[in-house]
Image: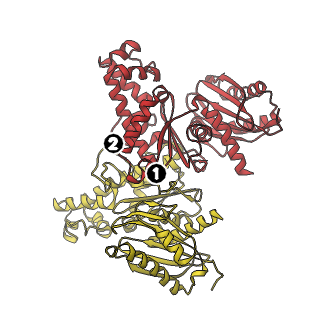
Chain colours: A yellow, B red
Amino acid sequence: MGQAGDYWVGFDLGGTKMLAVVYDASFQVAGRARKKTKGYEGKKAGLERIVNVVREALADAGVEPRQLAGIGIGCPGPLDIQQGIIHEAPNLGWKNVPIKETLQKEFNCPAIVGNDVDVGVYGEYRFGAGRDANCVVGIFPGTGVGGGCVYQGKLIQGKNCTAMEIGHIQISSEGAMDGAGNCGTLESLCSRLAISSEAAAAAYRGQAPFLLKDTGTDIANIRSGALAKSVKEDQAVKKIMESAIKHLATGVVTMIHLMAPDVIVLGGGLVEAMPEFFVTNVTKCVNSRVLPAYRDVFKVVPAELGDDAAVMGAAAWAQEAVKATV
Amino acid sequence: MGQAGDYWVGFDLGGTKMLAVVYDASFQVAGRARKKTKGYEGKKAGLERIVNVVREALADAGVEPRQLAGIGIGCPGPLDIQQGIIHEAPNLGWKNVPIKETLQKEFNCPAIVGNDVDVGVYGEYRFGAGRDANCVVGIFPGTGVGGGCVYQGKLIQGKNCTAMEIGHIQISSEGAMDGAGNCGTLESLCSRLAISSEAAAAAYRGQAPFLLKDTGTDIANIRSGALAKSVKEDQAVKKIMESAIKHLATGVVTMIHLMAPDVIVLGGGLVEAMPEFFVTNVTKCVNSRVLPAYRDVFKVVPAELGDDAAVMGAAAWAQEAVKATV
């Protein structure tokens, strides 16, 4: 059953579900549990559900709290990473959530919070597509465009906040508005949401007959799988996707010029639905525009860990952070 | 005279001059020497001049080579930082310059190469405007736009090359061509060269009468001092400068969203000629556009070390690098 202090918990707080996974010392899964997040029940009830899902994962693993070495937490929204407080959890309506303190008190072990995308990229660095790289940049186009960077074994973070808000870098003077109200950002030009809304307009205009018939014009339904099918059938959607990928490549070029990563990991549902299409097109666009010194010294690869990246990365980042403080 | 291994040399290889400074263990200047670079004499003669200027600085300091702990070298152009080779030195016409090996052999101590802007930013971090910051980003608009970043005490660099090519990030779909042939980059929109050429056109059109009379329309003459005077007299040049600063601020916003720096150091001749104008306008522009979590947690400051940033930073970075390998 392992010694005291041998197990790590990874926890991922999502908008609709929360997931806790218990890992042994070699990061093999020992147990897991999942619950609906139910943000509408409020912060207090939410923190109780969080504690309970960790308890259930421990029970599933047959592990006692005293056997825990630490808990890693992947959180959405702006965070205070020192205090371990979520300032504001988008989609949940919770404010100033003391998630670190709650879990530390309850399970009597260190708890480390990080941005959910950041810890996901750290997961890919430790166990997935970015293993052993000097520098990994991860970019995940979804409703927004998430990003993270592991540089020489450490996540790039601010003093009290997270960093690597890759979706919010401005790459163009044009483009629709993004979630933060800015135009021409990576998020406004190549998030899955931006692509879906352009594809919906093409379908409405009759330029994407397959998509129109298959899915309709409600962007809530035009998700990654629908886009992947439509790209093969609708020329207009293929063009939209290629244009979005050119913008994504601009963001990748910026990240290469700044961080000189050896590995760029692309992930998220849209990339998972058409990994070849993304990797090939992004690589081609980037190599044609990056400064000569940076050409061909990087590789673009699809993420390997899927939905488990955040929990696994959170647990491993907790291990790294606890090690650093010893 | 100090023990053996107590002194550090900082060396800066510029397009027109080379500078070597000897520092004691507490980084007080012990001696210095300067020579013209004379790139046209070729690589072999150049390496000899480099060795000789270091010798002269040592003689000026009354320090023997055996008293050296290491030499730090700030170089222009694409580098192999491991091998210590300058792939190509712009303006000098030298290729594959083995500067690290040459100095190590000659002075029998470790030599560490870095990009000249990078080591300058490291100098500001250790001794100047960015002292004790968790993360310092430096941006230096000149002929290009140089940049560097010290994150948690270390320069951000690639495995074999440098990084933080801030001037080459794309921030707009518009703009003239930069030195690398790309449009809409920070360099194409807010380098001193970009500003000078716009100002020259305004002068030629009769919209900048002060500049026309004071300097004329040759952009080789429209340098930082001339621009600083013209900004006060010519409305058109003031507008050009404000527009360039808005673009510069876009680059700063990107760096804040990515690195969450606590200090942004602006430097170079143009900033030195009008530090207030730059700091005030960049701060205002950035605060109006950065995500709420990053607002007011950074400060924008002018560089403090001037021309000595690179030599001092190179010497200190050599100390840091030698320490890390012990």
Q: Secondary structure at mark 1?
A: helix
Tell whether A56 sits left or right of B113.
Answer: left
The residue at 54%/78% (across/down) is A107
The residue at 29%/63% (across/down) is A231
Q: Circle 1 marks a residue in which chain? A: B
Q: Which residue is mark 1?
A: B258
Residue B89 in the image: x percent, y percent? 59, 33
Judged from this view, the residue extending furthest toward the left is A205
Tell whether A221 sits left or right of B135.
Answer: left
Residue A144 shows in this picture = yes
Q: Residues within 10 Å of mark 2 (few under 14, many from 20)?
A: few
The residue at 43%/47% (across/down) is B296
Quadrant hosting residue B234: top left
Q: Which residue is mark 2?
A: B173
Q: Nearer the viewer, residue B206 or A228?
A: B206
Lower sequence index among marks 1 and 2: 2
Q: Nearer the viewer, residue A173 or B132?
A: B132
Query: Against B19, is B174 above or below?
Result: below
Q: Circle 2 marks a residue in which chain? A: B
Tell whether B169 sits left or right of B68.
Answer: left
Which of the image's four quarters has the C terminus of chain A? bottom right
Q: Secondary structure at mark 2?
A: loop
Residue B182 shows in this picture = no
